[in-house]
Amino acid sequence: MTPIQKRLFADLKDTDLAQAALEAALEYLDTVSNREVFPDEGALAGLSHFHYPLPAEGLAASEVLSTLHRYGSPATVAQSGGRYFGFVTGSYTMAGAAAKVLGTFWDQNAALFATSPLAATLETVVEEWLRQLLGLPDKTVAGLVSGSSVANFVALAAARFRQLERMGWNVNEKGLYGAPRLRIVTGVRAHSTVKKALILLGLGLSSIELVPVDGEGRLRPEAMPALDESCILILQAGEVHTGAFDNFAELIPLARAAGAWVHVDGAFGLWAAASSSLAHWTSGVEGANSWAVDGHKTLNTPYDCGIVLCADRPALVSALHLDGAYLQLTEDRRDNMFYTPEMSRRARAVELWATLSNLGQRGVDEMVTGLHDRAKQLAEALRRLPRLEVLNEVVFNQVLIRGHRDELTQGILADLQSGGICWMGASVWEDRPCIRISVCSWRTTEADIVQTAEAFSDALKRMSSVN
Ligand SMILES: *Cc1c(COP(=O)(O)O)cnc(C)c1O
């Protein structure tokens, strides 16, 4: 054995080390809800301990781990706790996180049935469960990707393949040089990752026909251009400021009848379809051709859990086409890589399967509905405070806040972000600064909402000079 093999084998046998990692994780879990949501200056200063030259002789695994816990854990942002409302994130359940630990030790390459029958089976199962939970057509297939950025990209690649093929152009063979022009139609509030996907696909921003939206960011049906077979219509389930849903029941049948491909970016909002009291917002969404949704947002799986769903399997598989003599494909079994851009990747289905299996249909319903209830609770509490305005209809989990003066909005946000009680981000809505709140963690309790509303109230008092 070489010296490095000796060391690494010794590490593998060192169960104390594995126990220490688990203990550190559990200690973190225990404290994450009670510490400052954004790391304080001291914790950030501790990050300097990671800046050392690459060791010539490696450090002991136990030392590596203790450095991570000592300086890393306190410097994390407490996104998995109950009072992080920034961006649109989400926490994790014990079933999901623990499954991820086991999956890490399995280290399966999920590319093929031949590389992991287990990963192929779990993907087959979650695909079926997702169709059922989200009410999508039976022929819908799912690819597990890193997030909705990639899910949007992959779905739009399928759309590009199919729409160009309908116009007699095989984009895989001929590329885009000289291709018939595709028309991309979407609302002015389309997510930035949709635009990024269009850029990466070579379609360019100038091919987008932007449709005006209403005050909640919903595409206005009467402002839609006439669609045809060269069109890809991109709708949204959950606008990132207001949480609003496009009017699927009206728009999708029209677009499909005209021969357009309809893609729905439902990164966090598509989960409304799994809530008995919110599903009316996604009514008609099943008529689309493709959807993007994240497990790591509303469903609260650990990160790295995006899902592309596509009712046109041949288009998706053709868009991601790959072959090679050494690939061992299985005729009647699932080869996961046909549904994702990657070949080698980890078995993301493990924690998605574990989370869904652990929650069940009722648990998903209660969890999604609960996020909405807490968002409403917070909006009601903030409406009672002076000099603040709730800008949106709280239809899902997003709450948009503005002070009656921009200076007040900015002052309150800076106060909250440094106060450690909660954290939320800034944005701009209708040309004015605003505070964007996303209730996305199942760990947020009614008490967390009360505490957050109090933090707003205290911040307002400290800003008493801005009238
Ligand atoms: C978060 C989000 C995305 C991007 O998803 P990632 O998982 O961050 O890649 C796309 N669209 C919407 C509406 C989102 O909220």
Image (cartoon, rainbow, N blue to C red):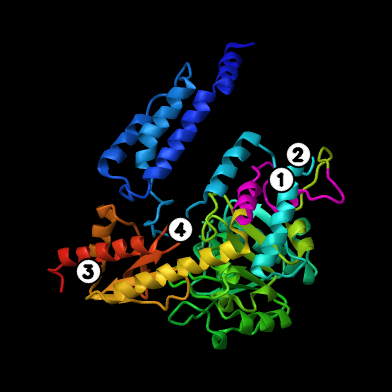
The residue pinned by badge 3 equals 408
Magenta range: 329-357
Q: Which numbered disc, 3 or 1, marks the residue that appears first in the sequence?
A: 1
Q: Say whether marks 1 and 2 touch (CB < 8 Å).
A: yes
- On residue 119, the disc is 1
Q: Nearer the viewer, mark 4 or mark 2?
A: 4
Q: Which numbered disc, 4 or 1, marks the residue that appears first in the sequence?
A: 1
Residue sitting at the far left: 465
Q: Residues within 10 Å of mark 1 (few under 14, many from 20)?
A: many
Q: Residues within 10 Å of mark 3 (few under 14, many from 20)?
A: many
Q: Disc 1 to disc 2, how far (Cα)?
A: 9 Å
SS at mark 4? loop
Residue 117 visible in the snapshot: yes
Q: Say whether marks 3 and 2 touch (CB < 8 Å).
A: no
The residue pinned by badge 2 equals 115
SS at mark 3? helix
Q: Quadrant of the C terminus?
A: bottom left
Q: Disc 4 to disc 1, how far (Cα)?
A: 27 Å
Q: Quadrant of the N terminus?
A: top right
User: What amino acid is found at the position of numbered circle 3 in the picture?
Assistant: Leu
Q: Where residue 366 sits: x, y (%)?
A: 53, 66
Residue 198 visible in the snapshot: no
Q: Residues within 10 Å of mark 2 (few under 14, many from 20)?
A: some
Residue sitting at the far bottom: 222
- The answer to whether mark 3 is within 8 Å of ligand 1 is no
- On residue 441, the disc is 4
Q: Where residue 97 sits: x, y (%)?
A: 54, 45
